[in-house]
Image (cartoon, rainbow, N blue to C red):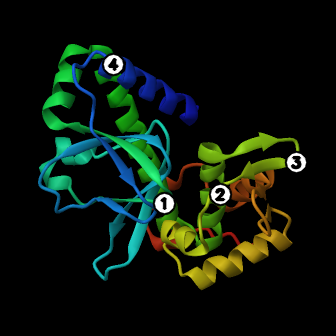
Amino acid sequence: MNNNFDRVDLLEELSRYLQNLPRQLPRLRAGKGMVILTPEDTEPVLYLIQSGQVQLYKLTPDGKQCTLTILHEGDIFGETHLFCTGCRQIYASALSDALLYEINTDLFYRLLEENPGLTIKMLAWTTRRLKETEDLLERIAYGDVRTRILYLLLRLCEDFGVHGEEGCLLDIRLTHQDLAHMVAASRETVSAMLSRLARDGLLKSDRRPWLVDCRGIHKQLAECLPADMGKYSDAEGKKTCHV
């Protein structure tokens, strides 16, 4: 599935419907690091990203951050706060300066009622988001740190990269700590593993943009992970990636 096409398609679809509204939607300018959404928010709002990057994350019982996904132009978030009052465990913060449209509950429900096509696209979008989260949690459960980082690099390349003959150019402003939040590891472990991937020729990260060898990563993951990770039922079934 082409994620970039999905994002642009949904953004254009929403924009087309919103152009007919008599009033302009409120916009939020979020500076880098600003917390946009918390479980404690009492007024559900759907956010549509016009520009910039936003991360969605949860906090573990001991207060550690676990990043679920990174969003950018054309992405939406806040839907769990709209549809499921008992599911409000998600935080959102700006990874870069971002410009967001705010769509309140009444307006969003009206848009869905009046535009069945938009409803279908929203359902497809939400389903894809759920699948991405399930994939992430599965790899955290069954893979070692190297495996998780390899998978994360592929996912970032799919969403943000530019593919060429030498590999994928990945120009996204993430720190080693940001990456650590996304793979449930310490910053020191992630830094050491990125250095090892560089020595193995899978990554050039000494300057921006990074150059990622997606083919090499796919090959190593094929050797480390089973085709159907869901078949594992206990810790005995884990495979690690010590190549």
Local packing at callout 2 (Cα closer than 10 Å; few below 14, some 14-19, many 20+) is many
Name which of mark 4 and mark 1 comes first in the sequence.
Answer: 4
Residue wearing tag 1: 95
Three-letter code for the amino acid on which mark 3 is drawn: Glu
Label 2, label 3: how far apart the Cα atoms are: 16 Å
Three-letter code for the amino acid on which mark 2 is drawn: Leu
Toward the front, the furthest residue is 23
Local packing at callout 1 (Cα closer than 10 Å; few below 14, some 14-19, many 20+) is many
Label 2, label 4: how far apart the Cα atoms are: 37 Å
Label 1, label 2: how far apart the Cα atoms are: 17 Å
Label 1, label 3: how far apart the Cα atoms are: 28 Å
Looking at the rendered image, the disc whose residue lies closer to the viewer, 2 or 4, is 4
Residue wearing tag 4: 19
Q: Does residue 137 sit above or below 160 in this rendering?
A: below
Label 3, label 4: how far apart the Cα atoms are: 42 Å
Residue wearing tag 2: 153
The residue lying toward the viewer, choosing from 206 and 122, is: 206
Q: Does residue 120 sit above or below 137 in this rendering?
A: above
193 with respect to 99 (left or right) = right
Name which of mark 3 and mark 4 comes first in the sequence.
Answer: 4
